[in-house]
């Protein structure tokens, strides 16, 4: 984490910004936000117990544009009550209430574990569950290979050998547990899935092309509340993208404070994101997830990986085209497992909108929709 910084004469500590203070991130880590004004610009120093998520940011009213040590750049918004920061990826930080002054004890108290010790145990539990879920995913893939794929028993045995090698390297001290898990997941899960998806993408194309046309023909009228009616011939991918702004107007809030635009393609990315957060179905879904799904599950490598794996042959092939999951990065300095990303060599969506609306409008349409 960042060492405490002393303010030189040209730097003034800013305490009135309601976002300054102690926060708790979605992983249970304590985050200290310190506001400063070097050269008259309001900035934030972010000190997270998880050093990957420490960093610096620029403050503009309730908006915090942060750059983290792990390379991520995110924009967060401070709630009017000053108790929640909502980041553009859906993660929320909750303000830690200041503890009241403790009264002098009248009798000796039993020693209690410190907050830092409890937080360390929580992080250890999350990390253990994360790695365990990844190992379970590897075992499930090996079982499916053995059960479904021709000569699958031979391939599964090879995969099991790789997994055993990773475990042996971890026990021998040659590999740390994160590296061992990442290596095995890369070879057994991601490598296998990418190869399967690459083959199926081209093999199933004659079937998927008319299927996508049928889906567009069925979806366009109801998603626009039947304001747009089309024939079978008109149900093209280009027509589907043309009516998307109408569909967004159906689901986005009507309050001008939440949606200060008539067409989502004319909005900035921040305006579009804010309007989506204000949509009724998004708020309801967010509430259900917060109440029913532990944060550790959503952040687990296995959950994120399965989500992207499912997205590839469904919405991915339809909206994007051929895509794959890049191998997970090996970073021995990282305290957590790496993020899961999706690579799109040629985006069908972007290619289509560029051809119809031009570079500037097409890129804006792609970013907002």
Image (cartoon, rainbow, N blue to C red):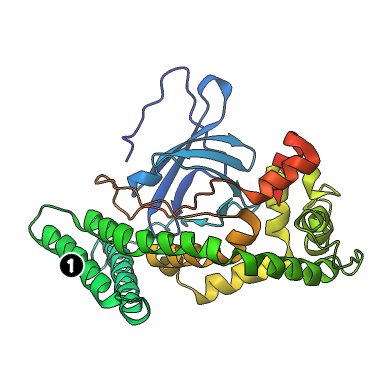
| Residue 33 as seen in the image, left or right of residue 61 | left
Identify the secondary structure beneath mark 1: helix
| Residue 324 as seen in the image, left or right of residue 287 | left
- Callout 1 environment at 10 Å: few (<14), some (14 to 19), or many (20+)? few
Per the image, the residue denoted by label 1 is: 161
Please say if 62 is above or below 118: above
Please tell me which residue lies in front, 136 or 249. Answer: 136
**Residue shown at 33% from the left, 55% from the top:** 337
| Residue 137 as seen in the image, left or right of residue 154 | right
**Residue shown at 27% from the left, 66% from the top:** 128
| Residue 224 as seen in the image, left or right of residue 177 | right
The quadrant of the rendering that contains the N terminus is top left
On the image, which quarter does residue 58 sit in? top right
Please tell me which residue lies in front, 85 or 200. Answer: 200
* Residue found at the very far left of the displayed protein: 172
For the question of whether residue 239 can be seen, the reply is yes
x, y percent for residue 230: 89, 65
x, y percent for residue 42: 56, 30
* Residue found at the very far bottom of the displayed protein: 147
Please tell me which residue lies in front, 249 or 321. Answer: 321
Please say if 291 is above or below 274: below
x, y percent for residue 252: 78, 60
x, y percent for residue 326: 41, 51
For the question of whether residue 107 can be seen, the reply is no
Please tell me which residue lies in front, 291 or 210. Answer: 210
| Number of numbered markers | 1
**Residue shown at 59% from the left, 67% from the top:** 314
**Residue shown at 34% from the left, 73% from the top:** 141
């Amino acid at each position: 984490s960042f060492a405490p910084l002393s303010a030189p004469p040209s730097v003034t500590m800013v305490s009135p910004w309601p976002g300054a203070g102690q926060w708790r991130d979605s992983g249970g880590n304590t985050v200290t936000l310190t506001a400063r004004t070097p050269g008259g610009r309001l900035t934030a120093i972010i000190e997270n117990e998880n050093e990957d998520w420490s960093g610096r940011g620029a403050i503009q009213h309730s908006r915090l544009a942060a750059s983290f040590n792990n390379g991520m750049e995110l924009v967060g918004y401070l709630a009017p009550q000053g108790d929640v920061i909502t980041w553009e990826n859906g993660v929320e930080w909750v303000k830690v209430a200041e503890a009241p002054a403790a009264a002098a004890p009248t009798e000796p108290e039993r020693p209690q574990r410190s907050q830092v010790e409890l937080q360390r145990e929580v992080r250890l539990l999350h990390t253990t569950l994360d790695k365990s879920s990844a190992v379970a995913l590897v075992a499930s893939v090996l079982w499916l290979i053995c059960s479904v794929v021709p000569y699958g028993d031979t391939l599964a045995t090879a995969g099991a050998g790789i997994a055993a090698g990773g475990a042996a390297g971890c026990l021998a001290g040659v590999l740390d547990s994160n590296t061992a898990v990442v290596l095995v997941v890369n070879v057994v899960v991601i490598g296998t899935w990418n190869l399967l998806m690459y083959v199926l993408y081209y093999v199933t194309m004659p079937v998927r092309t008319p299927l996508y046309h049928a889906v567009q023909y069925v979806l366009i009228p109801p998603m626009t509340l039947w304001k747009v009616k089309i024939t079978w011939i008109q149900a093209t991918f280009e027509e589907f993208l043309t009516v998307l702004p109408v569909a967004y107007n159906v689901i986005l809030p009507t309050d001008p404070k939440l949606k200060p635009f008539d067409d989502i393609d004319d909005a900035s990315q921040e305006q579009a994101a804010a309007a989506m957060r204000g949509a009724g179905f998004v708020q309801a879904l967010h509430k259900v997830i917060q109440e029913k799904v532990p944060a550790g599950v959503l952040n687990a490598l296995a959950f994120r990986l399965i989500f992207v794996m499912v997205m590839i042959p469904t919405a991915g092939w339809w909206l994007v085209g051929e895509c794959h999951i890049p191998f997970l990065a090996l970073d021995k300095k990282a305290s957590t497992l790496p993020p899961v990303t999706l690579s799109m060599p040629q985006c069908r969506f972007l290619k289509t909108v560029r051809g119809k609306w031009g570079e500037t409008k097409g890129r804006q349409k792609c970013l907002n929709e």
